[in-house]
Amino acid sequence: MIWVIYVSDKPHSKKNFVIGLNQQVWGVKDTKKETIEKVTEGDLVAFVYAISWLKAEGPPPKGFSRVSKEDLDKFRGAVQSITLARVSKAYYTSSDKVWPDDDYPHRFDFDNVTSFGTNVFFGTEFFNSDFVEAVRYSACTQGSVARASSIKSVSDITSITEYESEEEEATTGIEGRPILRLHLSRERDPSLAKKKKQSVIDKTGKLACEICSGDFKKLYGELGNGFAECHHKNPLNLRQENQETKLEDLAIVCANCHRMLHRRRPWLTIEGLKKIYEEQRTESSSI
């Protein structure tokens, strides 16, 4: 079971959050007692810290970050951090002073603290909707301990991107009619990709994928000459305005690896996907 706690960036919340992480204990007031009573040893807890609306998305919803459950899709933006931990001591009460404004007698202890990520793009496009709803509820109720009911493991927190999960239920279909799609896109400089590719060719003599080492020219001859894709290591979606992109901020990848990088959100890093690829290749070769 996974419990979710939203922590705001108000001065006292920020201070208490650091203290709680350092001492590996969390507590709530009497008014929130019923939200913490069912926390048991072995459960996972996710601390989601400080969501902010991205300016590039236009004006925020009125009263953000407090939005209704019906407007869950509007509870999005960037969170400063997501921290995961394992409950080491189930719900208990204590009057021992932990925080400066200590009025939190209903507590649980935790260990195995790990960072899920910092400056994470957040919303139903990127995370399981039940997880987002739990964060929204906790935010709207000033830090209640909320249960993400459908999530059984950490891997369930994120969501598969829409274009990666096409279902093939029908045996035939009618396709081809032009449709209009309206969406927010991020401004890109196409000359950067060209410069990146040329710099890699000048340095290595080829365009090999930084993950699987695939070289389209080697595979397809002249047809594949100069073909590769460029991946932004720092996602454009996290930017609130135009920022400088350097060539070292781009990675050369093949189309397959590029899709895998974007398959789960928050997106995998080059190093993370390369580790998965190499582990899988080693496992396959040993069979």
Image: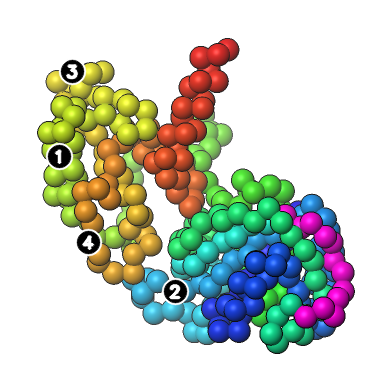
Q: Is residue 236 above or below residue 25?
A: above
Cα separation, mark 4 vs mark 3, equals 35 Å
- Tell me the quarter of the image containing the C terminus: top right
Q: Residue at x 32, y 34 (%)?
A: 210
SS state under label 3 = helix
Instruction: Magenta stretch: give its range.
Output: 86-97
The location of residue 161, given as percent across then percent down, is 48, 48
Q: Look at the numbered discs 4 and 2 and tell me whether their residues touch, using CB distance below 8 Å.
A: no
Cα separation, mark 2 vs mark 3, equals 47 Å
Q: Residue at x 24, y 24 (%)?
A: 216
Give the residue at mark 1. Answer: 199
Q: Residues within 10 Å of mark 3 (few under 14, many from 20)?
A: few
Q: Please tell me whether mark 3 or mark 1 is closer to you in this view.
A: 1
Q: Look at the numbered discs 3 and 1 and tell me whether their residues touch, using CB distance below 8 Å.
A: no
Q: Residue at x 60, y 54 (%)?
A: 114
| Mark with earlier residue (4, 2) | 2
Res 97 quadrant in image: bottom right
Give the residue at mark 3. Answer: 221
Q: Residues within 10 Å of mark 1 (few under 14, many from 20)?
A: some
Residue 76 part of the magenta segment: no
Residue 258 visible in this rendered orientation of the protein: yes
Give the residue at mark 2. Answer: 53
Given the image, on which type of amino acid does mark 1 rest? Ser
| Mark with earlier residue (4, 1) | 1
